[in-house]
């Protein structure tokens, strides 16, 4: 199938990937837009994995006050170079993080940041609830793990569904950004303020 400039532009508009990357993905997918999107996502994940060990000491601290002045957010996002920290994709990502945190009120950045005692307490609670509802003993752990994953989506920033497109998680946005900028990017920390809380 012939890959047209219009097809490349359409894929680029959807994914924000580079022109050559879009053309290669479309060629590999024989013009299938959905397959091409998956190819680009896989490529971004591979780049993110490769870059994960690199030190990210540059970046920004960004503040956001939600309209109505009742919710405020500060977030620190690090990258490898000042050049990337000043780039539009990076700035856009940080702004989206501010909005995500304001809207969804996560507790921590990563699952690893959660207090292990709290995780065990929640797992025990979910397992007990499943047992009380009459579920067989052999599936209690699986049910508890599934409920724990749902809880992570409430309290862990990287596990939350993205507020603008719930087919993606915040960690998918981070992976896409790393693929675009070609550097390791780390959400270091955040704080969320809400009047009266």
Image (spheres, rainbow, N blue to C red):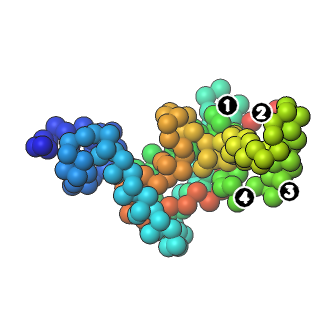
> Which residue is the site of mark 1?
69
| Residue positioned most to the left | 2
Number of numbered discs: 4
Q: Earlier in the sequence, mark 4 or mark 2?
A: 4
Residue 113 drawn at (x, y percent):
72, 58
Query: Pointers 4 and 2 in contact (CB under 8 A)?
Result: no
Percent coordinates x, y for residue 69 in the rendering: 67, 31
Q: Earlier in the sequence, mark 3 or mark 1?
A: 1
- Name the residue at 24% across, 47% down: 29
* Residue at 86% across, 38% down: 131
Question: Residue 113 vs residue 32: left or right?
Answer: right
Q: Position of residue 67 (x, y in %)?
A: 61, 28
- Label 1 SS: loop
Label 2 neighbour load within 10 Å: few <14, some 14-19, many 20+: few
Label 1 vs label 2: CA separation? 8 Å
Q: Quadrant of the N terminus?
A: top left
Task: For marks 1 and 4, give the CA distance.
Answer: 29 Å
Tell me the mark number nearer the camera, choosing from 1 and 4: 4
State the mark number for residue 195: 2
| Lower sequence index among marks 1 and 4 | 1
- The residue drawn where x is 76% and y is 55% is 114
Badge 3 marks a residue whose secondary structure is helix
- Looking at the image, do the residues carrying marks 1 and 2 touch, with CB atoms under 8 Å apart? yes
* Labels 3, 1: front one: 3
- Residue at point 70% right, 60% down? 112
Q: Nearer the viewer, residue 76 or 10?
A: 10
- Which residue does the numbered mark 4 point to in the structure image? 113
Residue linked to disc 3: 117
């Amino acid at each position: 199938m012939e890959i047209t400039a219009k097809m490349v532009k359409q894929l680029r508009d959807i994914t924000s990937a580079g022109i050559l990357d879009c053309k290669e993905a479309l060629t590999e997918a024989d013009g299938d837009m959905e397959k091409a999107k998956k190819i680009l996502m896989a490529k971004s994940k591979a780049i993110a994995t490769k870059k994960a060990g690199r030190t990210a000491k540059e970046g920004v601290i960004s503040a956001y006050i939600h309209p109505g002045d009742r919710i405020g957010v500060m977030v620190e996002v690090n990258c490898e170079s000042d050049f990337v920290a000043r780039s539009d994709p990076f700035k856009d990502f940080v702004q989206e993080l501010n909005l995500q945190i304001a809207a969804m009120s996560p507790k921590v950045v990563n699952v690893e940041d959660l207090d292990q005692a709290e995780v065990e307490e929640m797992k025990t609670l979910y397992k007990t609830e499943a047992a009380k509802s009459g579920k067989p003993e052999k599936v209690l752990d699986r049910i508890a793990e599934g409920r724990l994953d749902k809880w992570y989506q409430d309290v862990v920033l990287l596990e939350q569904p993205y507020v603008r497109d719930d087919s993606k998680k915040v960690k998918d946005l981070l992976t896409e950004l790393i693929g675009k900028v070609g550097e390791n990017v780390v959400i270091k920390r955040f704080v969320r303020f809400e009047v009266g809380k």
